[in-house]
Amino acid sequence: MELPGPLAKWARKVDRAEHEWGRREVDSWARTAEFARPFSWGEAEAAVLSRKYGRLPGSTVARMLGIVGWTAVLVIAIPLAGAPLIGLALVAVGCNVSGADAAQSWFSLANFAFVVGNLSAFSMLTIWWETRRRSTLVLIVNAINVIGSAGAFTLLAVSSASAESWLPVLILASGLISAVTLVLGLVSKPEGRSRRHSRKPPRRGPRGDKRARALRARQRLLEVVVHRGLVKLDEADLIRVGEFPLGYWSELDGLDEREWRRVLERRHTGWRDFGPQT
């Protein structure tokens, strides 16, 4: 899918600015810099991370677009995840208003909320069915569904207001599906690997939007030093070195051939598993 004209023009402007920055601040320097012999990965990375990461034209627009995008996600996700709680509030209002017509209006809105709640509950069950693992997100959403459904059903049971026949059915369905998925999640193994193998190292290097630029700058440095013959890497190792966490190239220094292979194949090296980072 193509970007709208103004956004595409802005994106090209940012790409050109970053390319020019990389050519000026990284490529020109890396082609002539005197690196340690034997080559020191840690020193080379520290040098590229110390380059000037000034603000690029259009970076403010990128930050604003990111904020708008996350806001839109939250606006959509929060009502979906909390639909049964919204339904509970609507049922509570409907049970306490005067007049059957007014109550039915609120119950109709609650019907819609619990339709969404059932969709949410079914989607969480689908996620569990595909992974068969305990997910924090699935547990939280199902707990919310169970609480909202139980509260709404209890209010209808003790209230003298007469709700539409579909509302209790929708509430029960939402609550039962969520309760089953919640129990299945609680008795399942946690998703991912064990805590010992899933630890991430402390972040190093630039933060925020400059971090992605630093990763790309380091990749440019890697390509230049390989082209200069300062290090010899095959295509697979080139990819693996590029996937190293930012600020941790020093882990490659002083390794023998066996340790080098263990690290590049992302096996446990005593403190974590290496893997791609964004």
Image (cartoon, rainbow, N blue to C red):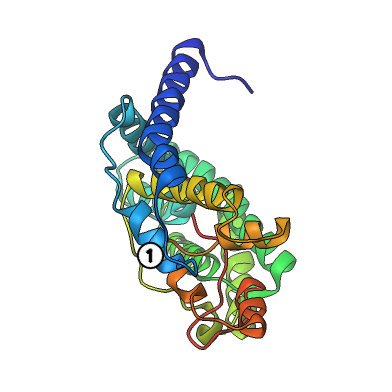
Q: Which residue reaches farthest top?
A: 5
In the figure, 249 relative to 193: above or below? above
Residue 41, visible in the rendered structure: yes
Point out residue 236 in the picture as x, y percentages from the top left corner: 71, 60
How many marks can you see? 1
- Left or right for 205, reference 81: left
Determine the image quadrant of residue 106: top left
- The residue closer to the viewer here, 82 or 224, is 224
Residue at 56%, 65% in the rendered image: 175
Point out residue 194 in the picture as x, y percentages from the top left corner: 57, 84
In the figure, 72 relative to 49: above or below? above
- Left or right for 249, reference 138: left
Determine the image quadrant of residue 122: bottom right
- The residue closer to the viewer here, 27 or 3, is 27
Determine the image quadrant of residue 171: bottom right
What amino acid type should be assigned to the residue bearing mark 1?
Answer: Glu
In the figure, 65 relative to 201: above or below? above
Residue at 64%, 57% in the rendered image: 238
The residue wearing badge 1 is: 43
Crowd around label 1: few <14 · some 14–19 · many ≥20 (10 Å): some
Point out residue 244 in the picture as x, y percentages from the top left corner: 52, 64
Residue 248, visible in the rendered structure: no
In the figure, 269 relative to 220: above or below? below
Residue at 45%, 18% in the rendered image: 7
- The residue closer to the viewer here, 41 or 239, is 41
Residue at 51%, 84% in the rendered image: 195
- Left or right for 80, reference 66: right
Q: Secondary structure at mark 1?
A: helix
